[in-house]
Amino acid sequence: MVALPALRELLATRDFRRLFSVRLVGQFADGLIQASLATFVLFSPEREPDPIKVATAFAILLLPYSIIGPFAGVLLDRWRRRNVLVNANFIKAVGVIPIIALVAAGNDGLLLGVSVLIVLGIGRFVIAGLSASLPHVVQGRDLVTANALSPTAGTMAVAVGALAGVSIRSLVGGGDAGSQFILALAGVGFVMAGLLAMRMGASTLGPTGELAKDTVRGVISGFIDGLRVLRDHTRPRRAITVVALHRISFGMLTVDALLLVRNTFNSVAQADNALTQFAIITGAAATGALIGAACTPWSSRRLGTVTWSAVVLIIGGITGAAFVLLGSESVNLPILLIGAAAFGFVGQSVKVCADTEVQLHIPDDHLGRVFALFDMIVNASLVLGITFMALSAPMSGQAPAMICIAGLLLVLTGVWLLTKRRTKGI
């Protein structure tokens, strides 16, 4: 597990604390955005979701990771990353304004989708920049601990932000007006994150290379270069593949959980109750992720990243699928929560190992574009899993064959990893 002395040493680093605060505040605001979209589109009694609407809503939340990612990475290897963190957060705050106007007008169509895509797309610069900046404020063995703490805490911040958004919306009266209030709070959060980023020096977060600003052609060339670098580095490439396969399974089970709470555990009129249950399931997955992040530094050092990743994939895939299957068939939320926690545990365990492999084995002047490609690949995989499940599962969410497929994919990924144990690391 992550030792307390290691955490204290990490948190004693001033620039790490500052970078960490930008992540926490900004991703909390991201959680508010997600809560407002979910309550407005998927959990409104007047707007019963069908599979296409479910897939579209999740695609809006996740496509910026895939579309913007490669371009964000190349630019992050040229622009001062601290300035990107400042400016991107401020632009996100401004971008929230038209979303509020569209929600006030009751518009849940194309314009809303485009507006949300713009805000979340700009957010890609922030998330990729935070990952690429981490080796500039943490070195050596502390990097594993930092990779366990930072992204996991960010994921938890998103979950807490979403839960807070749901609660605050209820306190201010619910409905579309409540969604507007959550959006306004998110805008304030983005402003705060930008101000926190201003506390760091302009050159503190790199990049270290002296590269000129690029053209669009250069951005595309850099994207191809990032792919070439990833092709030439087996360990990071294999690590990213593992995370991507997990995201396919996780996407499938996310849609399954949403359909269960929306259409099986509750009636159509009980939209608020369904939203609360979905938030609890999200919290269970985040809790599993937190436990995985706490265990992974200790376990991976002793077992090796291959063995540890394979073990959690095989055991977690079997356990998670079994509990999700049992919970869905018996309409039992507590059992379903155990399955969600298991899949969250697996996901964060392999993600911490993968982040470290990329940071240790990819040159610094390529880190931004490779992390952006990482985001692109794994989130495209998440969208793939979500779309596949949304188009295949019944509206009730009771799809035992699909749940078994999701679990089997993780088990087979773990077995494949075990065949690669002769290669040191992932």
Image (cartoon, rainbow, N blue to C red):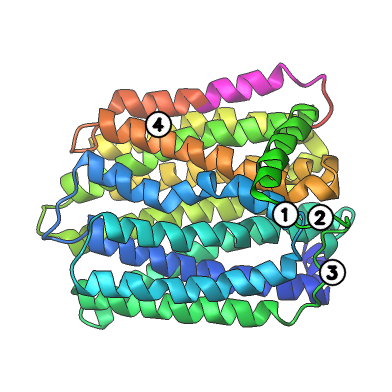
Image quadrant where residue 162 sits: bottom left
Q: Nearer the viewer, mark 3 or mark 4?
A: 3
Q: Is residue 67 visible?
A: yes
Give the CA separation, mark 1 to mark 3.
14 Å
Q: Amino acid at mark 4?
A: Ala
Q: Within 10 Å of the Cα at label 1, are there few (<14), some (14-19), or many (20+) other Cα atoms? A: many
Q: Amino acid at mark 1?
A: Asn
Q: Are marks 2 and 1 in contact (CB under 8 Å)?
A: yes
Residue 31 image point, x, y percent? 44, 65
Q: What is the secondary structure assignment of the residue under circle 2?
A: helix
Q: Is residue 407 left or right of residue 148?
A: left
Q: Nearer the viewer, mark 4 or mark 2?
A: 2
Q: Nearer the viewer, mark 1 or mark 3?
A: 1
Q: Which sits earlier in the primary sequence, circle 4 or circle 2?
A: 2
Task: Name the mark on residue 143.
Answer: 2
Q: Nearer the viewer, mark 2 or mark 3?
A: 2
Q: Within 10 Å of the Cα at label 4, are there few (<14), some (14-19), or many (20+) other Cα atoms? A: some
- In the picture of the structure, the residue carrying the numbered disc 4 is 322
Q: Name the residue: 36% across, 29% down.
A: 403
Q: Is residue 174 visible?
A: no
Question: What span is colored magenta in the figure?
Answer: 410-422
Give the CA separation, mark 2 to mark 1.
6 Å
Give the CA separation, mark 4 to mark 1.
30 Å
Main SS category, magenta section: helix
Task: Name the mark on residue 147.
Answer: 1
Give the CA separation, mark 2 to mark 3.
12 Å
Q: Are marks 4 and 1 in contact (CB under 8 Å)?
A: no
Q: Are marks 1 and 3 in contact (CB under 8 Å)?
A: no
Q: Within 10 Å of the Cα at label 3, are there few (<14), some (14-19), or many (20+) other Cα atoms? A: few
Q: Is residue 301 magenta?
A: no
Q: Amino acid at mark 3?
A: Glu
Q: Name the residue: 81% across, 77% down.
A: 201
